[in-house]
Amino acid sequence: MLGNNVGLLTVLFHHPPRAAIAKVGDFSPFLVEERECYWAAERQALQKHEELKMSVILCTAGYDHTIRFWEALSGICSRTIQHPDSQVNRLCITPDKRYLAAAGHHNVKLYDIKSTNPNPIMTFDGHTSNITGVAFHCEGKWMVTSSEDGTVKVWDTRTGSLQRNYAHRAPVNDVAIHPNQGELVSGDRAGIVRVWDLGESVCTHQLIPEEDVAVQSVSVASDGSLLCAGNKKGNVYIWRMIQDVEVTRIVPICTFQAHKDYLIRILLSPDVKHLATCSADHTAKVWNLDYDYPPAKMAAAAAAKGKAKAISNGAETNSSTSPTAESTDPAVIQERNRIQDLNAFRIVAGSRAPAEEPPNPFPAQPDGPPMDPTTGTPFLETVLSQHQRWVWDCAFSADSAYLVTVSSDHYARLWELNTGQVIRQYNGHHRGAVCVALNDYSEPR
């Protein structure tokens, strides 16, 4: 059995079925059983490959009011569902691959993926404006949505009933579920990231990275260790999430500018080693968060060497005796600049309800991702730049080896991240494609 972290896309692209290279004449005429066993194995391999292809659920949607399902390997559109009520803003697949949620103008429609029925099996009504985010509980028992109507709602997917209704004071642009399944994270146009405790039905944290700068997107690490947010100025903010007995502590660790234009989507990879950002500048970027990334290891070694040299030259002693001396060590300069940047982070935290007083600066922590000393940002792995218009959304494969992006140029593209190359292009939308969902996990998450 394949492990949870194995992506079926990788299996499809790198382990094709064995070709039938034997000929009848290759077998002894007396060994009929040998020939039959060979061809039976070939048929079994081909059947398994077909089953794998059907196990990769990839779908896109947008402003042409059409949801398209794609064969990831061939690029062929295998099914379409019309969504006449409105454009489709977001898509989400249940962890067991049974259902697809399509978020539109005022409602979310739930479709049976394995059925040929083009009609939704359930519709969730209650929002009064565009729905901007949708996510499922790990067992699909409930669903959370965010909306421009200023609310975050939790729905029972078995009955369709509304279970929770949380109010922001501004339109909400995105929502994510913490992997502990007990907390939600949402971001709004007033520039506030909120953390909600589902058990006690209260907001426990308010994070304000930049006053009155809309938070466009939020993402929570699959292991619950990180929270990321991106705003309309193209800036990214990363916090460490530390699970205590009764409450989650949230500590700012990194901030940087990812794009000079609107940042539309931010997404952490399943292995929490990569961070993808999508932008109005027609690109998606992939940033590395792994200390074992070779350029990061080289930079760390160079910084250590520079520090050792400074100590041997007496620089450390001089700086300690002179209150006005400034260190010239690149590592020290980088850390000082990072701490100054982090002063922009602001937090209002409480174990129950968020405080109303103005937020205070939150102290910086030294356990952020590895930073490129030449740019002051995390190491940029690759810039995905073949789209011709805004890049709206993205989705990682289960093993974090691939990324799917969608754009106003009508196309969806599948990128192999270790090469930065497009390996499939999905053509069919006749207006902008703005959302994508991918589930290629070998087992339910």
Image: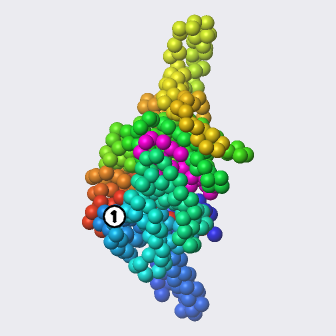
> Which residue corresponds to the image point at 36% horizontal and 58% vertical from the top-left?
434
Q: Position of residue 430 (x, y in %)?
A: 26, 66
**Residue nearer the viewer, 295 or 379:** 379
Q: Amino acid at mark 1?
A: Gln
State left or right for residue 211 relative to residue 7. Answer: left
Mark 1 residue element: loop
Q: Is any part of residue 135 visible from this angle? A: yes
> Which residue corresponds to the image point at 58% horizontal and 21% vertical from the top-left?
307
Residue 349 lies, with reference to residue 419, above or below; the image says above
Tell me the quadrant of the picture where the N terminus can be found. bottom right
**Residue nearer the viewer, 281 or 76:** 281
Residue 98 lies, with reference to residue 130, above or below; the image says below
> Which residue corresponds to the image point at 46% horizontal and 31% vertical from the top-left?
376
Crowding around mark 1 (Cα neighbors within 10 Å: few <14, some 14 to 19, many 20+) is: many
Whether residue 202 appears in magenta in the rendering, the answer is no
Which residue sits furthest top?
Answer: 322
From which residue to which does the magenta span run? 174-194
Whether residue 181 appears in magenta in the rendering, the answer is yes
- Which of the 4 image quadrants contains residue 363? top right
State left or right for residue 82 relative to residue 38. Answer: left
Q: Position of residue 16 (x, y in %)?
A: 48, 70
**Residue nearer the viewer, 276 or 296:** 276
Q: Position of residue 328 (x, y in %)?
A: 50, 16
State left or right for residue 199 relative to residue 39. Answer: right
- Which of the 4 image quadrants contains residue 33? bottom right
Tell me the quadrant of the picture where the C terminus can be found. bottom right
**Residue nearer the viewer, 445 or 373:** 445
Q: Is any part of residue 57 visible from this angle? A: no
Q: Position of residue 74 (x, y in %)?
A: 38, 70
Residue 320 lies, with reference to residue 300, above or below; the image says above
Q: Which residue is mark 1?
A: 87
